[in-house]
Structure formats: structure tokens, C-alpha cells
Image (spheres, rainbow, N blue to C red):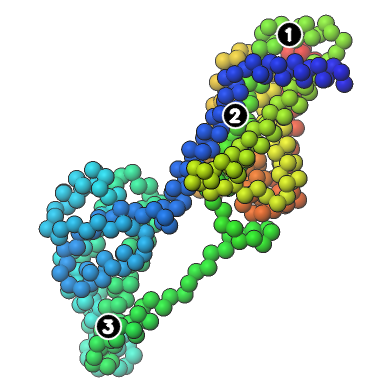
Amino acid sequence: MYKLFATILKDLRILTRDKVGLTLMFLMPVVLAIVITAIQNSTFELVNDNKVPLMVCNRDTGTAGKNLVEAITKIGMFELREVSSDISNRHISDRMHAKDALVAVVIPSDFSARLNQRAKDVSSRALNDFGVSSSSAADANTKVEPITLFYHPVLQVSFRQSIQGALRSALQIVETKQVVRNLYFSLNEKEIPDSVENQIVTNQVSINEVPVSRDGSRKIPNSTQHNIPAWTIFAMFFVVISLGSSVVREKLSGSFVRLKTLPTNYLVAIFSKQITYLFVTLLQTAVIFSIGAWLFPFFGLPPLNIPSDFTGLLLVSVICGWCAVSYAICIGVYAQTQEQANGFGAVSIVILAAIGGLLVPAFAMPDSFKVIMKLSPLHWCLEAYYGLFLEGGKFKDVLMNIIPLLVITLVIQLIALIGLKRKELI
């Protein structure tokens, strides 16, 4: 036990001298967590608190164009900036390049006339089908010139689709109003009252959003709940910069040879490094979680909600940290130089994070990557944390994620042990 304690003390002293490694292990993940969470939080709240700048050029002189503008306004997603109807498409494009707006909508000049004609055709066809009218059925396929949607190239496809969905909803409301008005007038030979029209058109079934959770709570997950666990795992695995270099440095400096002359086994030194750096990973977890819980509100970000199963959170953190430490030691055993350990270690962590779902959500990955994804230990770490943070589960609920992680960790330990034996270090 004394030998182990002395070795741990030695490793702690070496660690405190590694200023670059400490910076990478603590400062970089904290900065990443704050910056990326702030950016993603702005994206999450874009449709709620912030509004998308939308330029509207209404070239229609009828009521349908005005109704469409009103419907777009009521959506609440856009900050409308109406421009003159005689403005050219080229001028609209120039203003968008100047970042006056990210999206622009151009309503054609004959929008009301054509929409009204199509509404009459649809209502006439419906009355004929019901047997109310004996007149010849009209053509219900009257074409309306499409609404032109200009968008800035910085907008991603998924966000453009959300904008299109909102605009289609507004357009559908206007079209439905026209059809209802024509049907009512054909049946009653008078204009439809506003109260009846609103009741027919806007009387939609509401949608109640309920996040699925194991504990029955209805807390809506925020960007902090997604990002803090992910970047905590990233920070854990980045101990490869310090720990991998430490193992290589001891090999190159002849420390291994000196250790062989002592009445002890090098496995004690390896076990010491695992204990020391496991403590470092837990300290990283505590620091990043504390920042998320207490410091984020000062930046205007949603606070991190710590899971109710604190024991489960601790166990998951220990297992994730052990896997990260095992991977770092394995890299250090096989690397010939510190540059190899640092370069391969850092790049491999980024790759494992990418295929593991830290950089791109797992559900958004192509099917060909979903098998490879399960080989990444970071994937199982993230799934275990998400089971606690997002789903409100207990430790028993994430066991199916912990077991593969333990298997991967033991395989990494075995690979490192084989490397130590081949190099005659043990």
C-alpha cells in the first residue's frame, strides 16, 4: 500500500507540472461548454424569444395578400419588414446580402384574383358533389402563381424547412378562408360573419408536448442538458494529452528501466496512474457540472438540472472516467514519442466523438454509421449520461449502456497489458 501511495504522490507531482495538459483538461472543455451551449441555446429559442427577420414584398392589391401577411405575423416566428411593392427581386437579393433579412417572401400581383377563382372552383365542385348545386362542375385545378421565397445561404436545410412549414401553415389558413367564404356565400347568399369564419378556420386541435421521462417529470430538456454531459465526456477523454505523454515520457527517460531495479512491479505504477487520473476526470466532471448548475444562469443560459439519482451519476462518472484513463494509458503504451501520443490521441478522440454522437446526434447519422457508432466508448458514455439527465432515469435504467462501456474498457485494458508484455515492461 505504501508503494502505491508513493507512486500516486509521484504522479500527482508530475501532473501539477504539466501546465499545458491541465489547461487542455480543464479550461478548454469549460470554454467549449459555455460557447457551444450559448450558440445552441440561441438556436433552440429562435422560434420562441428571438424572431427570424423576414422581408415581405406584397405586390398583390387584393385582400388575400393582406390576409397572408397578417397570418404570417400571427405565427410569431418572424420579425416582418415590409418593403415597397415595386422593389425588384435583384434589390431584395442585395438587401439580403447586406443582412437586412435572412428570408424574403414575394407575393405575386395576381395572388388574390387567382386564389379567389380557385376557391370558387373548389366550392363549386364541392356543392356539385353534395348535390346542392346543379351547375356544371368547374375546374378545381386553377393554378395560382407560387409565392417566391428567398433565403440567405447561411440558413441550413432543416431550418429552411421549418420556415417553409410555418409559411405553408399561413398560406393554408388564407386558402381555407377563401373556400369557406365562397361556400357560405353560395349556400346563404350573404357574406359569412367574422365570428363564424374565425370559429371554422382557427378552431384547431391544440398539441400538448410531453417529454418522455422515466421519473414522470415533465421538465423540457434544454441545451444545457444536452451539451454539458457531452463536453464533460470530451474533457475526460482528453486526459490522453497529459496521461499518454506521461507514459511515453517515462519510457523515453529510462524510468521503466529504473523501476525494474526496484522491489516492485510496474503494474503498481500503471494502477497508480489510473487512480490519479480517475480522480482528475471526476474533478473535471465536478467542475463542469458546477459551472452548468451555478454559473450558466449568470450568462443568461438555462441551468443544469442535476439528476435525482446522485449515486447513479457518480457511478456513471467513475466508469466513464475509468474508460477514458484506460484509453489514454493504451495510447501511451503503444506510442513511440510524445508527439505520436498527443497527435494520435487528440485526433482519435475527435473521431470517436464524431461517430459517437457528441458532435452530430445519433438519430441523424446515416444507417451505415450506426454500427460503427456502437464501437465508440464515447457513445455509450453519452447514452448513459442522457439516460440520467434527459430521461430522468436511475442507474439501473442505464445498465444496458454501462455494460458495453465496461466491456470496451476491459478490452482496452487487455490491449494495453499485451503491449506492456510485448515491450517487456512487466
The span from disc 1 to disc 2 (Cα, nearest Å) is 28 Å
The span from disc 3 to disc 1 (Cα, nearest Å) is 89 Å
Q: Residue at x 15, y 60 (%)?
A: 85
263 to the left or right of 78: right
Residue indicated by mark 2: 26
| 401 vs 250, nearest the viewer | 250
Q: Which amino acid does label 3 sit on?
A: Arg
Hey, which quadrant is residue 58 in on the image? bottom left
- Residue 362 showing in the rendered view: no
The span from disc 3 to disc 2 (Cα, nearest Å) is 65 Å
| 384 vs 354, nearest the viewer | 384
Q: Where's residue 329, x and y in %?
A: 69, 23
421 vs 115: above or below: above
Q: What element carries label 2?
A: helix
74 vs 389: above or below: below
* Residue 255, numbered label: 1
Q: Where's residue 56, x and y in %?
A: 23, 58
Residue indicated by mark 3: 181
Q: Which residue is drawn at 74% across and 22% down?
A: 273
Q: What residue type is labelled 1?
A: Ser
Circles 1 and 2: CB atoms closer than 8 Å: no
- Between tags 1 and 2, which lies in front? 2
85 vs 339: above or below: below
| Number of marks drawn | 3
Choose the circle earlier in sequence order: 3 or 2. 2
Q: Which amino acid does label 2 sit on?
A: Phe
Choose the circle earlier in sequence order: 1 or 2. 2
User: Furthest residue to the left?
Assistant: 86
Q: Where's residue 197, x and y in %?
A: 33, 82
Hey, which quadrant is residue 18 in on the image? top right
